[in-house]
Image (tube, rainbow, N blue to C red):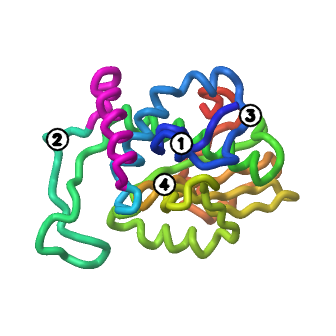
């Protein structure tokens, strides 16, 4: 059984309940590097102050130390840092954040965890697994990134079903994880958008073999569609 989203995205004991999914050994045990990197950035980019508890900060520091020792190529590039003076459409007098370039190791982690999210949520909502006959794509972006406002609003309007992660034993759980989804079981079409705190959004689509994209939809045609299947690398 695998846990999606990764436990690394949360302080110990805070990962949401009922998000364990069947997975092969290769997929379950072969993505620990990606889990760690994705977990670190999902917490680092979370602008929800309710999720900045001592437990969150301790977890973030532990992930940073682990990445520094084992995957230093995934640490933020301080040489590329630039101050951001904008919050949505508002220009601020002082920086609200620091922008750094995304390294290849981080992009690879986002891609791998995005694929795991797509397969896991498809299984949860459609009650069946993604097979080699499926195609899918996933994409991850930061909620605060300029130019993504329209996409975020569109996904919010488009997807009808909201699932909120929680733990019954923690009353002040915080807004740590949720996803919206929509599906057509008969046509074998599934769309989702998952949000971690107030930072990262991962969204994507899964299409069955009988679903064809409209040739007039250039935006979807240009997406990086991959084959389905299971196991690490099954999306290549």
Residue labelled with disc 3? 22
Q: Is residue 71 magenta?
A: yes
Residue 196 badge: 4
In magenta, the rendered stretch is 52-75
In this rendering, position of residue 137 left or right of residue 126:
left
Residue 13 badge: 1
Q: Quadrant of residue 41?
A: top left
Does 236 appear above or below 154?
above
How many angstroms separate mark 4 from mark 1 (CA)? Answer: 16 Å
In this rendering, position of residue 6 left or right of residue 109:
right
Q: In what element is the residue under mark 1?
A: loop
In percent of width and height, residue 70 lies at 34, 21
- Nearer the observer, disc 2 or disc 4? 4
Residue labelled with disc 2? 78
Residue drawn at (32%, 66%) of the image: 146
How many angstroms separate mark 4 from mark 3 (CA)? Answer: 22 Å
Residue drawn at (60%, 27%) of the image: 233
């Amino acid at each position: 059984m695998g846990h999606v989203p990764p436990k690394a995205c949360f302080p110990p004991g805070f990962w949401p309940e009922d998000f364990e999914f069947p997975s092969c050994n290769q997929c379950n045990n072969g993505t620990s590097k990606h889990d760690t990197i994705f977990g670190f950035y999902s917490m680092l980019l979370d602008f929800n102050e309710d999720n900045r508890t001592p437990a969150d900060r301790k977890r973030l520091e532990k992930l940073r130390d682990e990445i520094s020792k084992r995957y230093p190529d995934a640490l933020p590039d301080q040489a590329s840092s630039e101050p951001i003076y904008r919050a949505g459409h508002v220009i601020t007098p002082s920086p609200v954040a620091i922008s750094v370039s995304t390294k290849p190791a981080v992009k690879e982690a986002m891609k791998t965890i995005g694929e795991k999210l797509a397969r896991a949520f498809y299984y949860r909502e459609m009650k069946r697994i993604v097979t080699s006959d499926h195609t899918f794509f996933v994409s991850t972006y930061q909620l605060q990134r300029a130019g993504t406002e329209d996409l975020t609003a569109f996904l919010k309007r488009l997807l009808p079903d909201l699932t909120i992660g929680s733990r019954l034993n923690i009353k002040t759980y915080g807004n740590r994880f949720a996803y919206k989804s929509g599906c057509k079981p008969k046509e074998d079409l599934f769309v989702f958008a998952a949000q971690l705190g107030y930072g990262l959004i991962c969204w994507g689509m899964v299409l069955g073999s009988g679903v064809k994209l409209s040739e007039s939809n250039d935006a979807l045609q240009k997406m990086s569609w991959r084959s389905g299947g299971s196991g690490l690398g099954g999306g290549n």
